[in-house]
Amino acid sequence: NAPTEPLPPGEALKAGEQVRLNPNDCEAGIALMGSTGSGTRERAKRKAGGGAPWAGVRGDCGVVNSGRWAFCVWNESGGNLRIGWSTANATLALGTDTFSWGYGGTATKSHCG
């Protein structure tokens, strides 16, 4: 069963749990739409009139400080997006500070601006 509440920091996922988009760690311009019927894919979209050119959201758990980690993203809208990694200290504008790294829909890496 996937968790219904975001996991507190530092808690490991248990067998069968999925990473979810965190409603407590996203910008106002994002509408979280819940998971798909299978419960394995989270859905989000920009709200109409969201204001800022980018609207960010983080997952509800992180990864340890070593090893190899990956995630998968489907762009169902066909719009431009940026995906990547960040620490809890980063802003939600992925890739614009020293605490995050992003990869954009224009095949551009972003870090520190």
Image: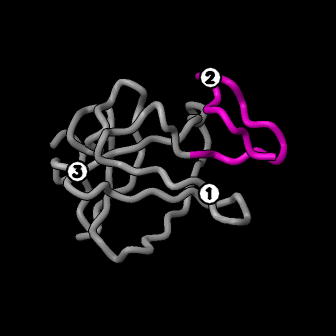
Mark carried by residue 65: none
Which of these two is toward me, 50 or 66? 50
The region drawn magenta spans: 1-20
Pick whichever of labels 1 and 2 is earlier in the sequence. Answer: 2
Residue in view at x 28 percent, y 62 percent? 104
Which mark lies nearer to you, 2 or 3?
A: 3
Q: Secondary structure at mark 2?
A: loop
Q: Is residue 94 above or below residue 6?
A: below
Residue in view at x 63 percent, y 45 percent? 19
Pick whichever of labels 1 and 3 is earlier in the sequence. Answer: 1
77 left or right, relative to 106 = right
Q: What's the residue type where badge 2 is placed? A: Pro
Q: What's the residue type where badge 1 is placed? A: Ser
Location of residue 89 in the rendering, given as x and y in whole percent from the top left corner: 36, 24
The CA distance from mark 1 to mark 3 is 22 Å
Which residue has dot 2 on it?
A: 8
